[in-house]
Image (spheres, grey):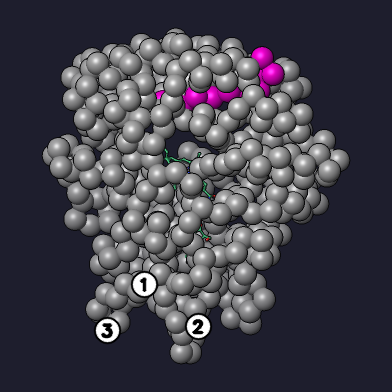
């Protein structure tokens, strides 16, 4: 059997299971021996990468790439793979958005655009010398870049085998606690909405990833059972939030039914939108074990809400938020400050929303430009962002300190409001989180949060900005 090596370069700070690569491995494993290496959560080690590639001696090396710091890590891995004479294929969000520029790199031989389950199999066949339909891929043919059209059919999530958790080395590392660990489970593709700042509003994502799909809820339960049968530590929370989980009342009912019928006593975290949520749904999800929900508000300004198709009525949102909290769901409302073209008055409208819509956590971030989105286009038009000429140039995107103010709010006002409001909100969040941990018997997390808290994180962020 030929071997394939799939690599998640990840980022230095976060350890996260290589979900995308496990999805790919699941469909490839019948025909190939698939090895997954996950370098997330640590510095890259050149010798280790070299050893991993030499030992696997694969037909090709596939790498998952996000915009931002992971790009430099992906390039480092690719350079080593190329030196060892391997074919290098990139997939994931960044090459999906910018396939052509990615292929200009001497370290990348081909890319998969959008979801990879069907298209990657065809690309591998091509490298095996077989005739193959290369839809959904970008290749170099005698040095000439060719971007193929999307595949006609989208992946049917219910027909896929479960992600290949069993081939992961030391899966215990993704579950740091003795008890009450959570498992990220990917149940969706794309998003039903197209927010101006989000990857899902990118043209290639729309074409090559296709429309919003959500898997049969029973699959999440099956995946949970599979992982719990492999991992010794106790997992009892499903994190199914992704970009959008509770898309409708009908789907929420189905998901709740599947969780309750499993009789496993598991809890879950989800993501929805104020437009799709109502009190009846909240009752239903609480009854089925939902303990945490993320809702995007983003802005209090009607004009900016329209860019994100999030027309949020403050009174309605307040009622839903109050109800969810009364029902003891931990509620996170997310906001962006410094939207492209945002004015001081619009910023103040957002601050009014933050103060008036209750939440356990107000997750307030400064807008960070991400390529391929309508927001990014505005940033370029407004000359707030310079488009990098080479892939390396994207490493600073999505991280703090890069072109942080693309709005029309003066720097001083934006940053001082951002840090002042965060100082209050982070303090409230810290206490609410501790209460949440106690309520759900998460003693280990309570202690960890007590000793390693978010104040220091925000302080570091503030100092980074001050230095610039
Ligand atoms: C979990 C998650 C996180 C986690 C873990 C990060 C991680 N390792 O993915 C955390 C919380 C840390 C995180 C952080 C951030 N995230 Co995030 N995150 C996600 C989320 C919700 C799920 C990822 C996932 O598991 N997907 C499920 C799998 C099945 O999909 P997949 O990985 O894309 O894989 C498929 C295809 O892409 C392809 N494929 C993938 N890799 C490969 C490799 C090869 C060789 C091939 C052939 C194919 C292939 O095939 C797979 C199967 O079809 C996605 C949204 C989403 N739905 O994907 C956002 C997403 C990846 N995040 C995003 C962003 C913007 C961020 C942040 C910048 C947010 C911020 N403002 O701080 C940060 C920093 C990320 C960074 N640059 O380091 C964007 C990325 C946009 C981009 N251009 O890169 C996404 C797409 C959200 C969005 N809708 O805009 N994130």
Mark 2, ligand 1, within 8 Å: the answer is no
Where residue 319 appears, x then y in whole percent?
56, 16
Marks 1 and 3 in Cβ contact (< 8 Å)? no
**Which residue shows up at 18% across the image and 43% down it?**
380
* Residue 304 placement: quadrant: top left
**Which residue shows up at 57% across the image and 41% down it?**
247
Disc 1/disc 2 C-alpha distance (Å): 18 Å
Q: Mark 3 packing: few (<14 Cα in 10 Å), some, or many (20+)?
A: few
**Observer-nearest residue: 146 or 124?**
146
Nearer the observer, disc 1 or disc 3? Answer: 1
Marks 1 and 2 in Cβ contact (< 8 Å)? no
In the rendered image, residue 329 lying in the magenta stretch gets the answer yes
Q: Is residue 292 visible?
A: yes
SS of the residue under disc 2: helix
State which quarter of the image contains the C terminus.
top left
**Observer-nearest residue: 289 or 76?**
289
Identify residue for label 3.
142
Where residue 395 appears, x then y in whole percent?
31, 47
Where residue 329 appears, x then y in whole percent?
66, 23
**Which residue shows up at 49% across the image and 78% down it?**
122
- Horizontal arrangement in the rendering, residue 138 relative to residue 223 (left or right): left
Can you say whether 441 is above or below 189 in the image?
Answer: above
Which labelled disc corresponds to residue 149?
1
Identify residue for label 2.
125
Q: Which residues fall within the magenta stretch? A: 326-336
Disc 1/disc 3 C-alpha distance (Å): 19 Å
* Residue 176 placement: quadrant: top right
Q: Mark 2 packing: few (<14 Cα in 10 Å), some, or many (20+)?
A: some
**Which residue shows up at 70% across the image and 49% down it?**
217
Can you say whether 462 is above or below 262 in the image?
Answer: above
State which quarter of the image contains the N terminus.
bottom right
Disc 2/disc 3 C-alpha distance (Å): 18 Å
């Amino acid at each position: 059997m030929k071997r394939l090596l799939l690599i998640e370069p990840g980022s230095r700070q976060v350890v996260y299971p290589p979900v995308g690569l496990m999805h790919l491995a699941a469909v490839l494993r019948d025909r190939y021996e698939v090895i997954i290496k996950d370098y997330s959560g640590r510095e890259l080690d050149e010798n280790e990468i070299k050893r991993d590639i030499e030992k696997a001696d694969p037909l090709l090396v596939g790498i998952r790439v996000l915009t931002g710091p992971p790009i430099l890590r992906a390039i480092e891995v690719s350079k080593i793979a190329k030196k060892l004479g391997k074919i290098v294929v990139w997939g994931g969000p960044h090459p999906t958005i910018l396939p052509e520029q990615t292929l200009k790199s001497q370290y990348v031989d081909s890319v998969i655009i959008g979801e990879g389950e069907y298209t990657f199999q065809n690309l591998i066949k091509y490298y095996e010398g077989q005739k193959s339909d290369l839809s959904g891929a970008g290749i170099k043919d005698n040095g000439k870049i060719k971007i193929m059209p999307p595949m006609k059919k989208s992946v049917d999530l219910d027909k896929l085998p479960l992600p290949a958790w069993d081939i992961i080395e030391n899966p215990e590392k993704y579950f740091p606690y003795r008890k009450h660990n959570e498992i990220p489970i990917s149940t969706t593709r794309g998003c039903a909405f197209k927010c101006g700042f989000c990857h899902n509003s990118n043209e290639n994502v729309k074409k090559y990833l296709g429309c919003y799909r959500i898997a049969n809820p029973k699959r999440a339960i099956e995946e949970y059972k599979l992982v719990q049968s492999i991992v010794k530590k106790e997992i009892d929370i499903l994190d199914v939030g992704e970009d959008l989980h509770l898309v409708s009342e009908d789907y929420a009912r189905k998901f709740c039914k599947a969780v309750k019928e499993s009789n496993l006593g598991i809890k879950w975290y989800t993501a929805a939108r104020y437009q799709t949520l109502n009190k009846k749904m909240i009752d239903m999800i609480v009854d089925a074990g939902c303990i945490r929900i993320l809702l995007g508000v983003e802005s209090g300004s009607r004009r900016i809400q329209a860019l994100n198709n999030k027309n949020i009525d403050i009174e309605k949102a307040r009622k839903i938020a109050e109800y969810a909290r009364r029902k003891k769901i931990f509620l996170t409302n997310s906001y962006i400050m410094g939207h492209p073209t945002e004015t001081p008055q619009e910023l103040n409208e957002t601050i009014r929303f933050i103060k008036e819509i209750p939440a356990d956590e107000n997750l307030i971030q400064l807008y960070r430009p991400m390529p391929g989105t309508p927001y990014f286009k505005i940033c370029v038009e407004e000359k707030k962002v310079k488009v990098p000429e080479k892939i390396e140039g994207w490493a600073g995107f999505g991280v703090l300190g890069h072109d942080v103010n693309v709005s029309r709010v003066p720097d001083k006002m934006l940053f001082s409001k951002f840090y002042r409001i965060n100082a209050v909100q982070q303090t409230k969040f810290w206490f609410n989180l501790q209460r949440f941990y106690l309520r759900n018997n998460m003693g280990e997390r309570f202690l960890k949060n007590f000793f390693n808290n978010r104040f220091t994180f925000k302080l570091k962020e503030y100092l980074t900005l001050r230095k610039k």
